[in-house]
Image (tube, rainbow, N blue to C red):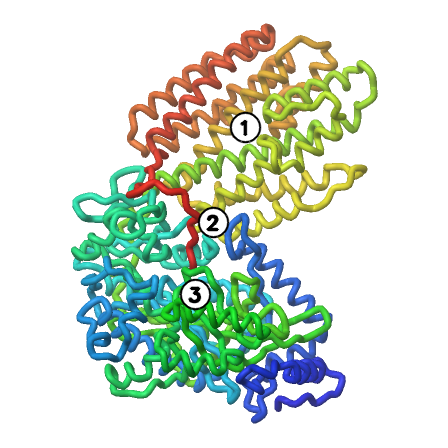
Amino acid sequence: MTAQPQESGSLLHEYADRVRDLQVQLPDAAVCDTFVDEWLRADGQTPHHEVIDLANRLGRGGLLARKAATARHVRGDGLTYGSTSGRRWTLDPLPIVLGSQEWTQLERGLSQRAVLLDLVLADLYGERRLISGGLLPAAVVLGHDGFLFGAHGIRLPGAHQLVMTSTDLARDASGAWTVLSDRTQAPSGAGYAMADRRIVARTMTRLYRTTELARLRGFFDHMGDALLDAAPDVDRPHIALLSPGPDCETAFDQAFLANLLGMPLVQAEDLTMRDGQVWRRTTHKPERVDVLVRRVDAEWSDPLDLRGDSRLGVPGLAEACRRGKISVVNPLGSGVLENPALLAYLPAIAKELLGEELLLPQPRSWWLGDEESAREAFGRLDTLVIKPISRNSGELAIHGWDLDAGQLANLRSQIEAEPWRWAAQEQIAMSTTPIIGPDGLEPRRFVLRSFGVGGAEGYRFLPGGLGRVSTEAGSWIVSNERGGVAKDIWVLAGDREQADLTARHRSPDSLLLPDLDSRISLTPRVADDLYWWGRYTERAEATARLLTVVDDLVADNHGRGDSPGRIAMTTMLDTLSASSGVAQRADESPNDFLRRMLTDASTPGTVAFTVTQVVRTSYAVRELLSNDTWLLLSRLQGALQARVDDDEPLTDTLAQMLESLIGLTGLAAENTVRDEVWSFMDLGRRVERSTALVALLRTAADSDRSPVADGQVTEATLRACDSGITFRRRLATGNGPASPVAGMLQLLLRDPINPRSLEFQIDRMLTVTAGFDNAEVADALQALRRLTSVADPEEFAAKRTRLAAWGTQLNDQLRDFSDLLNSTYFRRQTSSRRMTSQVQIGVRQ
């Protein structure tokens, strides 16, 4: 199929018209006066034939359906740019296709560039011959925030200093791939690329299955091998990924990568220094860390040697690197290679270090600290992209053609004041590619981010990489921070050897994972989050169940005077208020109170607030949770966010929420390996269920009522505990106490085979903690077990005050047990800082 539309009314014809319109809108001052489109190649050699055919077959409605399906998968997989406060990842389902030969040629250029940058990095923190030999001005290096004097002399074992590399590319006006910039500080996005592929494979299933593609999984195997190559000379190196935390904008990418490679994701508080070695704090013995994959910017990584006000780093990390005790990947100081002024000198450096011309073209660039370069750039400032050399400056790239005369004059004055801080580049045309819009296919400018890893066999690259496009048709800005749209990049396999893309070069006994005992150990922070994940999910479910019961009682009995049903309704409203800690306002109707209990996310104890905590803790430990978790969380949030009008019942929303919460419980119970992850999640659930049950029974059975009202309260309590069917079956067969209240207490307090009973919870906690080998924890649980064993359901039914007193004592012991877990396993480490300063910490990825 040629690039020209065969049918005048086709989507492709409409798209071609939009591309031509965009061509006309090019600014007069821009250096490029034309661009290419990925689908509309003038030579007709586009590899997008099958994608184009599919788009025409689907039509506008079919494409919009695929776009909607993609958005659902993004929500279901939990893809975010940011965390709970971040935005959803935006993915267009139409892939960008690269031919096998084109990718092979591009890969050669990327490999050459990675080798060159690796040599430059080694020189800048070694002999600095590039500076002394005049190939690179000292001010270009010393004036960049990424150059760290404290990193001098640090050298990684293995073949490469630059282990991970990333390059942003775009096509120029001729269609040739051109370098825009390099990312070497802590390259992010490979996890997003893999996640995008999984979603597009589900959205475009037939097309994906019938297209021979280079697969992505092998790249991550090579990444694991490269990390082992960079490790110090130790047996079975331990590898961890250092993250700024779940609120980092690329937290999903970090967790996805950690999960894919099987390495723990750590934060600064999880690490400690001892005898010059970095250790990971765990709930048992400390675990040595030999390789640290750094996702914290270098200057924030060590508050002792580098930035003293950082809470994100490990004091002494730089010194441990200098002594060869640990390998940090990418090494401290590697961010200096991101300097846009460096591009002006790379062609000459390539000739000096490699004896070669650069295979990949790059835009003509100027460092404005050089007087001659500045004069030339000032003469055409309105056609250039002007950039601060350091991204940490907070200033963004400026497009000269977007400025009027006054703004250009102000910019020139700003540059002249500190010329060494600025660089300029010619604008690259940037190809366009279609995305699915409400009116059909719309052109957007496209940037490709490549990913490479350097190991013993050289640099290997993720086939394709991560595609990103602008949000607006006329925009030159392609940025995740500004809401860019992602694209899956397909590289046609052609004659490429598939085994070469997937095979590991290491034997199975040198896997990335350490031994089993250390692999399942958790840091106190993670154990704490898992424990509270269990508590919050159980709390949300219990509150939603009780809210459902009370909502039914209000619907049946509100306004019925002093009837037994009205008494039961009032009792259970009080029970809901007491167990949740949310008081009903004096001027608040029962319906308004129940609606607030469901939807008010700002008040602790409501369903909405607790669900928010479930989501927050899920993001904090996302690398440990099943992929299915995010689908259930998405449904849970969707049910909560759906508008419920004042005259609509809460039943449907509560049913949807309970379905998702029960699903989360099932995942934890049936899909989680019985290691420490499951243990702390289950402990949290059992402690919360015990606490909630005691609170429920103390308020629901705290006074004498008429037999009819007591029966209705008993039935409501059993429904809230999902034990009504068992109770009725036993009552019908005469099995158990004759009193309904005593029978309820027997079932919920002392029944060892009822998963909702208190005795079952205590026995389960004893089983879970049996492997902890901690006498104090065991003694505390045995004390709880003894107190449970003296509970007499018939006595409590006859004398409700004794139930209240016993419940108070049990509640105190449960609280003490939770505190004991906290002091024993969850004790956090205070982040060390050299100086006290309240700053805005920003981590750029």
Image position, residue 552 (x, y; %): 74, 29
Q: Tell which tag, 1 or 3, sits nearer the viewer.
A: 3
Distance from the alpha carbon under mark 3 to that under mark 2: 19 Å
Type of amino acid under label 2: Asp
Judge from the rendering whether residue 754 lies leftward or rightward of residue 500; answer left or right. Answer: right
Q: Tell which tag, 3 or 2, sits nearer the viewer.
A: 2
Mark closer to the chain start, 1 or 2: 2
Q: Residue furthest bottom?
A: 43
Can you identify the residue that label 1 sits on?
A: 756
Mark 3 secondary-structure assignment = helix
Q: Residue at x 54, y 67 (%)?
A: 486
Q: Residue at x 53, y 51 (%)?
A: 628
Q: Residue at x 22, y 72 (%)?
A: 123
Image position, residue 162 (x, y; %): 29, 68
Question: Does residue 737 lie above or below 270 as drawn?
Answer: above
Q: How many marks?
A: 3
Can you identify the residue that label 3 sits on?
A: 190
Q: Is residue 764 visible?
A: yes
Question: Does residue 239 lie above or below 450 as drawn?
Answer: above
The answer to the question of whether label 1 and label 2 lie on touching residues, with beta carbons closer than 8 A, is no
Type of amino acid under label 1: Arg
Label 1: how many residues lie within 10 Å, few (<14), some (14-19) or many (20+)? many
Q: Nearer the viewer, residue 536 or 33?
A: 33
Residue 483 image label: none
Q: Tell which tag, 1 or 2, sits nearer the viewer.
A: 2
Label 2: how many residues lie within 10 Å, few (<14), some (14-19) or many (20+)? some
Can you identify the residue that label 2 sits on?
A: 247
